[in-house]
């Protein structure tokens, strides 16, 4: 007998003809198949009826009583006392008057060093109609109160009008005029500040070009929407050298993180778009690039990261097999994502509750260290030292337990 899937159970005569070794092997094979099928059924049951969240609820401690049980033992048979109701007479409260004065020394909702502030002096009705001399004689300024309000002005578009004088030499009668200032896009009527503003609004604040066109039209400009599209394309071409330099810096990083996410790009047919993938890559100097590939093939990882990584390189990724294959082929250390590692133990709770529960508790301790880092707002070297002191012993103990 083998561990292959049994298609037919032996009848009584066939069982009687088998020796004890074959019967024991048959029982072990059946037990293994039952365990596999039970795990599959449990997985399908969770997908259909269970919660999709991976929130972990620890196994109950047999020695730990719940609050209701504790109160029940402390007060056995004590009758519940009905709540006593009392009528409260209705009353009116006087609404506090406010002149919207900000008593703080500086307004907390904006950065005075970065935000333009327009000062408006509010006249005092007590001195209206009096001359400055009369005010100085009758009143003394003993202080001031300041209040702030957030206001908005129309879009800050402006047209730069370059005036170039044409001069003529009296002796030679030749005309001379200075050239117009060069722009980042030759012959374009768009200033570099406008190109940057359009691209930032579109890609950082997700404001579509047609809405930007509507805003420009309302501000009094007569421009075409295709011109804005061409402007974004030309601006992206200007950024290519910066992208290439940043991507090369990421490749030289010893520690890199990579992932892939699907995206629709290009037309595949009437009403259909092609499926492609962005592969965000993160370097050790906080650089991020988003290379695009038309597929999710394993070869994309080699083209993305190169086949000659530096000595001691570390690749952080999820459990996609393409990354582990790349790590084996190039010799880099493959550091997989803790969330994906934890998921395997979470899914094993039904099959191996005790061991999976212990693994989840140990991983939870590592997560608690990260929670402290967020609470203390640690960054850079302080974050690294905190992890070395608190998280590294936990991780080493976890992998020793796994081994």
Image (tube, rainbow, N blue to C red):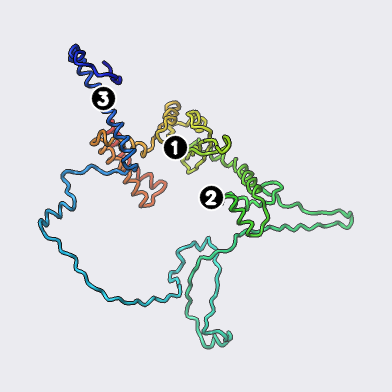
Q: Nearer the viewer, residue 61 or 165?
A: 61
Tell me the quadrant of the picture where the C terminus can be found. Answer: top left
Q: Earlier in the sequence, mark 2 or mark 3?
A: 3
Hey, which quadrant is residue 326 in on the image?
Answer: top left
Label 3–label 1 contact, CB within 8 A:
no
Q: Which of the 4 image quadrants contains residue 33?
A: top left
Between marks 1 and 2, how big is the CA–CA gap?
A: 31 Å
CB-based contact (under 8 Å), mark 2 and mark 3: no
Percent position of residue 290, x then y:
52, 40
The span from disc 2 to disc 3 (Cα, nearest Å) is 54 Å
Which mark is in front, 3 or 1?
3
**Pointer 1: residues within 10 angstroms few (<14), some, or many (20+)?**
many
Q: CA distance from mark 3 to mark 1?
A: 41 Å
Determine the residue positioned at 54% across, 35% down: 274
Instruction: Check disc 3 and report the residue beneath it.
Output: 32
Q: Which residue is mark 1?
A: 255
Mark 2, secondary structure of its residue? loop
């Amino acid at each position: 007998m083998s561990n292959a899937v049994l298609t037919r159970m032996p009848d009584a005569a066939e069982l009687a003809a088998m020796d004890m070794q074959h019967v024991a092997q048959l029982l072990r094979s059946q037990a293994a198949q039952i365990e596999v099928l039970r795990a599959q059924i449990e997985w399908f049951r969770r997908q259909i009826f269970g919660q999709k969240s991976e929130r972990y609820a620890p196994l109950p401690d047999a020695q730990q009583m719940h609050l209701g049980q504790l109160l029940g033992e402390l007060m056995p048979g004590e009758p519940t006392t009905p709540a006593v109701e009392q009528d409260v007479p209705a009353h009116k409260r006087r609404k506090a008057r406010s002149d919207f004065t900000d008593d703080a020394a500086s307004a907390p909702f904006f950065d005075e060093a970065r935000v333009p502030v327009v000062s408006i002096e509010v006249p005092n009705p007590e001195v209206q109609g009096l001359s400055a001399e009369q005010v100085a004689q009758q009143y003394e300024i003993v202080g001031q109160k300041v209040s702030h309000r957030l206001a908005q002005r129309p879009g800050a578009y402006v047209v730069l009008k370059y005036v170039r004088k044409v001069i003529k030499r009296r002796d030679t009668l030749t005309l001379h005029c200075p050239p117009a200032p060069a722009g980042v896009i030759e012959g374009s009527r768009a200033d570099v500040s406008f190109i940057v503003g359009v691209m930032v609004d579109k890609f950082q604040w997700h404001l579509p070009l047609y809405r930007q066109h509507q805003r420009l039209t309302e501000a009094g400009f007569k421009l075409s929407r295709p011109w804005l599209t061409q402007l974004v394309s030309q601006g992206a071409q200007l950024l290519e050298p910066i992208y290439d330099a940043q991507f090369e810096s990421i490749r030289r990083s010893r520690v890199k993180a990579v992932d892939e996410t699907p995206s629709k790009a290009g037309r595949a047919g009437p009403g259909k778009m092609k499926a492609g993938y962005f592969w965000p890559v993160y370097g050790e100097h906080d650089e991020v690039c988003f290379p695009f590939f038309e597929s999710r093939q394993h070869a994309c990882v080699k083209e993305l990261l190169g086949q000659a990584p530096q000595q001691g390189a570390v690749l952080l990724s999820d459990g996609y097999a393409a990354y582990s294959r790349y790590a084996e082929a190039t010799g880099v250390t493959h550091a997989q994502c803790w969330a994906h590692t934890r998921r395997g133990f979470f899914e094993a709770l039904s099959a191996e509750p005790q061991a999976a529960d212990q693994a989840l508790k140990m991983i939870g301790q590592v997560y608690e260290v990260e929670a402290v880092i967020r609470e203390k707002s640690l960054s850079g070297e302080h974050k690294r030292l905190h992890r070395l002191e608190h998280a590294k012993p936990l991780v080493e103990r976890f992998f020793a337990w796994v081994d």
